[in-house]
Image (tube, grey):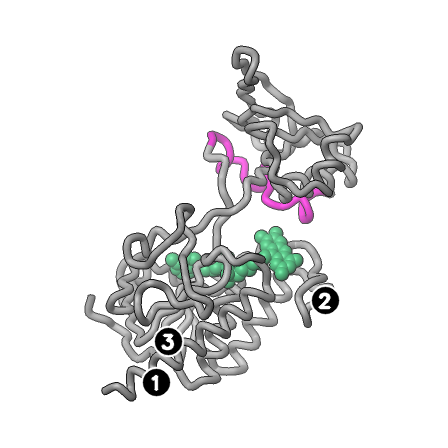
Amino acid sequence: MAADNNQNDLLIVGGGPAGIAAALWGKRLGLNPLLLEAAAQLGGQLLRSHNRSVDCPGFYGLVGADIAERLTVHLVREGVRFETQAPVTQIDCATKTVVVHGAVTYAGRALVLALGVRKRKLGIPGEQEFAGRGVSTSATRDKGQYVGREVVVVGGGDGAFEEALLLDEAGAHVTLVHRSANFRARPLYRDRVLGHPRIRVITHARLTTIEGTGWVERVTIKVSPPDAPPHQMTLPVDGVFPALGVMADTELVAGQVARDADGYILTDRHGATSCPGVWACGDTTRPLLSSLSTAFGDGATVAKAAFDWLEAQEQSR
Ligand SMILES: Cc1cc2nc3c(=O)[nH]c(=O)nc-3n(C[C@H](O)[C@H](O)[C@H](O)COP(=O)(O)OP(=O)(O)OC[C@H]3O[C@@H](n4cnc5c(N)ncnc54)[C@H](O)[C@@H]3O)c2cc1C
């Protein structure tokens, strides 16, 4: 690829906490970083985090959008270059060149992948159509709308169980639907939900459609019990909360850097990928703990690792 913009020592794809930390440290180390973010705002998952931070040093009591705002102001004050609404549609790791919007190319001397993760979807009719009209991505944000109403939460992990408990506490009538009887949720949540007098749990079941007129009115569920023939049921509901966890979003670098079986990028302890001059940081590397603190630390580390690598490249010339 011939680059339209090749003045970047450090090119960073992804403007979540990890990419932002990489950009700040890249700037501090004199690497003239450029950060490219697909969304209209920086922040990544912070923009859908409506709980108040209690575990990230320095951000106590703030919701995700406030933290994202502070991080953006920080970048601006430090003069770090970033572009939003700049979805990278092609990445060439060997040449450290990326294409934005399928049209404009950018080249860096070093490349940082801070691609994060995206929410898994149900992938069924009605999910997209009723987004924000009964299909919700956050119980923390929307629970007030469902007092005294019927809701269905889908999933078997911590997120699903937490959403079920939050909605019940807010006064909704909750049904939790999961595809098997094995729950990934930690015992603390499992015990509270499975023994709960008001939360109904349907296992071996999948939602197949979400229907309504203007707002969600019902879901169809296919139940496949291990010891009985499959059957279908219709549940009248006002709200649907898919909570299926997240997945890596790394197809752009498939075959270019080593990834694990689920698509998360494999790195050494300083974030180096299998391709020289390309680093990865934050949730895209499946950290032991997916968090703001680790994303910040990972981002800072890859900037320093890239700096050292670029210095070594210079010296070997
Ligand atoms: C509801 C919720 C609550 C949370 N609560 C907490 C909490 O209380 N405490 C805590 O520590 N952590 C919390 N987290 C986790 C924390 O937000 C994440 O661990 C952190 O955001 C990971 O940062 P990241 O930069 O690695 O990835 P992300 O935040 O996922 O950011 C990745 C960014 O890359 C961009 N991107 C991806 N592909 C491209 C592309 N091709 N082109 C351009 N841009 C691209 C995405 O648009 C996104 O903005 C929460 C997360 C959620 C969802």
Q: Which mark is residue 311?
A: 1
Mark 2 sits near ligand 1, with its Cβ under 8 Å away: no
Disc number lying in front (3 or 1): 1
Amino acid found under the numbered disc labelled 2: Tyr
Residue, x 46% and y 64% (percent of image)? Answer: 281
Among the two numbered marks 3 and 2 on one chain, the one whose residue lies closer to the N terminus: 3
Question: Pointer 3 and pointer 2: residues touching (CB < 8 Å)?
Answer: no
| Towards the viewer: 47 or 196 | 196
In screen coordinates, is 46 left or right of 141? left
Examine the rendering and report whether any part of residue 170 can be seen. yes
Q: Which residue is mark 2?
A: 60
| Furthest residue in direction left, as rendered | 2
Which secondary structure lies at badge 3?
Answer: strand
Could you say where residue 118 lies in the image, as x and y percent from the top left?
A: 48, 50
Amino acid found under the numbered disc labelled 3: Leu
| Towards the viewer: 184 or 113 | 184
| Furthest residue in direction front, as rendered | 268
Among the two numbered marks 1 and 2 on one chain, the one whose residue lies closer to the N terminus: 2
Spatial separation of the CA atoms under disc 3 and disc 2: 31 Å
Query: In which quadrant is the N terminus drawn?
Result: bottom left
Which secondary structure lies at badge 2?
Answer: loop
Could you say where residue 268 lies in the image, as x and y percent from the top left?
A: 42, 65
Among the two numbered marks 3 and 1 on one chain, the one whose residue lies closer to the N terminus: 3
Q: Which residue is mark 3?
A: 10
Q: What crowding class fits label 1: few (fewer than 14 Cα within 10 Å), some (14-19), or many (20 or more)?
A: few
Disc number lying in front (1 or 2): 1
